[in-house]
Image (tube, coloured by chain):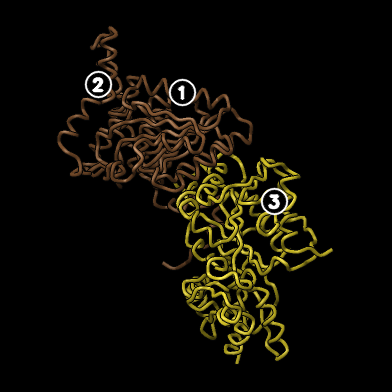
Amino acid sequence: MYRGLWRIRWFEGQVQRLAAAGEVPGFPHLSTGQEAVAVGVCAHLTRQDTLFTSHRGHGHTLAKGSDIQATFAEIIGRDGGLCRGRGGSMHLVDAANGVLGATGVVAGNLPLAAGAAWAAQAKAETTISVVFFGDGATGAGVFHETMNLAVLWKLPLLFVCENNGYAEFTSREEHSNVKHVSAFAAPYGMAAKTVDGNDLRVVHAAAGEAIKRLRSNDGPYLLECMTHRMAGHFVGDAQHYRSKEELAAMKEKCPIERLKRHLIECGVEESELDVLGEEARQEVLQAVARARAQSRPDPATVLDYVYSAPCLNGTAGSDT
Amino acid sequence: MSQTFIEILRRALDEELARDPAVHLLGEDIAAGGAFGVTNGLAQKYGSQRVRNTPISEAAIAGMATGAALCGLRPVLEIMFIDFATLAMDCLVNQSAKYRYMSGGQLAVPMVVRTQAGAAGGAAAQHSQSLEAWFTHVPGLVVVTPSSPVEAYGLLKSAIRLGDPVLFVEHKRLYAQKETLVVDAELPQIGKARVARAGTDVSVIAYSAMVRNALEAADELARSGVSVEVIDLRTLVPLDMATIAASISKTHRVVIAHEAVQSGGVGAEISARIGSELLDELDAPVTRVGCPFAPIPFAPELEKALLPGTPNIVRAVRELSG
């Protein structure tokens, strides 16, 4: 899992570097500093379990086990990307691995995940569904609609809130009077817990407990992970809304540094950990190089995948 | 034995529930039959797991239907009034419509959103609209607008079996209409219009309840020697330009009629397509019949004053054929 954290960190470092160089179309959102939530939760999932993520979803996708090269290729819009260059950073889908989608509209992924959980329940499958969202999503009505429905229908759905204290550029204090997202669970009758999302061991244990309940058909669960977005809202965000002290303090809370300190205290050699970090770096760099070498999508295929059959796309006019 | 539009819809749903265990119904009050009684008795027959009541949460239930469709169910969602689809627009426009495309073909959303629309006696501004044109502007969605009970039967079954998200718009004025259903072995193909009445002088292109008005207008005009061909579009997306072209190449005059607001309506798109693809066939400008640019009023006199109907079509055809 230590290597898993580094894999995401290096991956997003490359996204940031290439975005600055103009190689990444659009505006990718990084999860730097929030990696422990992705790794700690996804460690408990099978490929068949379904995962829905948000606009900040690179980490979740990698932690679920999606191929680094295909994921990166999608983010730079290559034909060999997960979605053949149709989705990009905010719409990663890896269906074979149960990653059923990242959503660019905040809170839009919540009912989709509930629908996946409903399908599993209807087909008497043992899989669960997990949805990652930020604390900003709690401002949307559909968050509350989905919480209510998930409990009513006793869905096997894990809500994972990454509370990084910011809804885009606005701090939590400014956008909600409710400090902890887990407080929303009680009125709907849902089990919930708030944990330190930057401590991998804590996230892993709490997610394990929650998922055990889900797999025993105890209904949905809300896990709130308090974390810190070390990067801006998107690549290029100058973060004028944060103080230098706040940004400096965040480095102290870095989940990778914290896990490293703990492992060294437990007697693991620092050099061994450095090897793991370096292995992750090489793995990512090689995958990124292969992704960058891939061909770009053929413009002639731009109308593919709109409908189940091309004849349904008869609305496309002959005007030029 | 003749059956109402509502009874025939119920029969189609019943048969699809029996045929395919992946088909699930969900919506507000549907276990008790729904606001119009379409699903009466289906929860008793198939159980509350397959015919599921939901809270008044259009955004969430549209999302749940979409998520379930991604995972192998074929949900049929009832949105009680098309006016309430506004609450589900993020899901329908940003998610359902685009999933196949955004995922590069990995996933599909085989889902039907049944909803009812149109004005029918005092339902006023928030329960009477014809908003179908909005959905025709979203690539990935299919829009079906049946014009009669028999049409609704086949089109609903075809829609449920399609691999794409479908908005299925039922006109509330048609609900009590009765027809005798003769079941064909073959279901209608989504995307094929039909000639509801053959004629030689003017083509009237219509859909949903307005097809009835067009047929009434054709009867009236026939008495004064004008032969009207009525095209029932059946689906707005895909739009069957081939059937439209075949008709216009015969009549060379065309009226497009719908109850929806004329400005920015489906008629505008069809008119533009005719202008660019069939200009040489036209002997007169394309004429549109639609609702004036105002909300649907409450008082019967005002509602009647606003809504386009048979006299509007008759007038439009006379102007073209005179």
Vertical arrangement, residue B45 with respect to residue A311, above or below: above
Q: What whole-number distance in Å separates the C-alpha atoms at marks 1 and 3?
A: 40 Å
Q: Secondary structure at mark 1?
A: loop
Which tag, 1 or 2, sits closer to the chain's start? 1
Q: Which residue is mark 3?
A: B32
Q: Label 1 sits on what residue type? A: His
Mark 3 residue crowding within 10 angstroms, few (<14) / some (14–19) / many (20+) = some
Whether residue A295 is visible to the viewer of this picture, yes or no, is: no
Same-chain check, marks 1 and 2: yes
Colour given to chain A in the rendered image: brown
Q: Chain of mark 1?
A: A
Characterize the local packing of mark 1: few (<14), some (14-19) or many (20 or more) Cα atoms within 10 angstroms: some
Q: Which residue is mark 1?
A: A44
| Place of residue A257 in the rendered image (x, y in percent of width and height, measured from the top left) | 25, 21
Q: Position of residue B196 (x, y in %)?
A: 69, 72
- The amino acid sitting under disc 3 is Ala
